[in-house]
Amino acid sequence: MGRGKVVLERIENKVNRQVTFSKRRNGLLKKACELSVLCDVDVALIVFSNRGKLFEFGSIDVNKILERYHQRCYSSGSSTNLDEIDIQIEEVSKLRAKYESLQRSHRNFLGEELEPLNLKELHNLEKQLDETLSHARQRKAEIMLQKLADLRQMLEEEQQCMQEKEGGEEDHPMNYEVVGADPNMNTTRYFDPQEEEEEGRAMIEAGNNDLIPDWLL
């Protein structure tokens, strides 16, 4: 009478599972050894138990067999993958170098780590700072000029609205508005939108922050 068919599934009983592992592991190691002797081949067998214990067999040194395995995998049919890996490594190296260079430049702009820089590098840094400052001043002047234009438009709309309410009375002789007065002095400053707009344009052309009125800063 033959043995029944063994169902290939996890053995729930812990003791039976351990006994089965020991028996079949020894049988597997024996078969690997027989295959190596009978067929004159290099065989490597690695088994880890559920507790992480290592069992291995090698007809020769297992490390040598694994090294041959890796060389064969990378040399046959994997040259394209190796080329892609080399390209990726090169790109990563370039990005890392660029990132480090940007970090150094950022620290230099903050006035840090200037000692390693030579005279030419310091001159270039000074030039970049001057250009950056000039652009910042120009942008600031453009924003202020835009605000002046918006203010002028708002004043014109308010003046038109007041004229309509007054029923077409005579216009105010001066399109000025009091924008500030010094309480300690008997003086008052008036605002002329057109004059201030022209002053803002001149300030952009000159690119000089000194031309910006103090009361607008």
Image: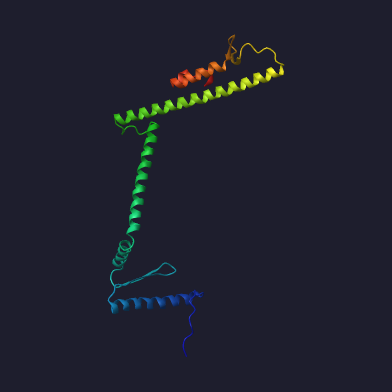
Q: In front here: 24 or 131?
A: 131
The image quarter in which residue 195 lies:
top right
Compared with residue 195, is residue 34 higher up or lower down, i.e. above or below? below
The residue furthest bottom is 1
Does the image show residue 79? yes
Residue 23 shown left or right of residue 34 in the figure: right
Compared with residue 93, is residue 26 higher up or lower down, i.e. above or below? below
Q: In front here: 116 or 148?
A: 148
Q: What residue appears at the point 39 percent right and 75 percent down from the top-left corner?
A: 25
The image quarter in which residue 131 lies:
top left
Residue 26 shown left or right of residue 149 in the figure: left
Residue 54 shown left or right of residue 40 in the figure: right
* Label total for image: 0
Q: In front here: 15 or 11?
A: 11
Give the image location of residue 196, x and y in percent: 53, 17
Q: What residue appears at the point 44 percent right and 77 percent down from the top-left corner?
A: 20
The residue furthest top is 186
Does the image show residue 208? no
Give the image location of residue 65, x and y in percent: 30, 67
Give the image location of residue 140, x and y in percent: 49, 25
Colour scheme employed for the rendering of this structure: rainbow
Residue 20 shown left or right of residue 73 in the figure: right
Q: What residue appears at the point 34 percent right and 47 percent down from the top-left corner?
A: 93
Give the image location of residue 64, x and y in percent: 28, 66
Compared with residue 22, is residue 192 higher up or lower down, i.e. above or below? above
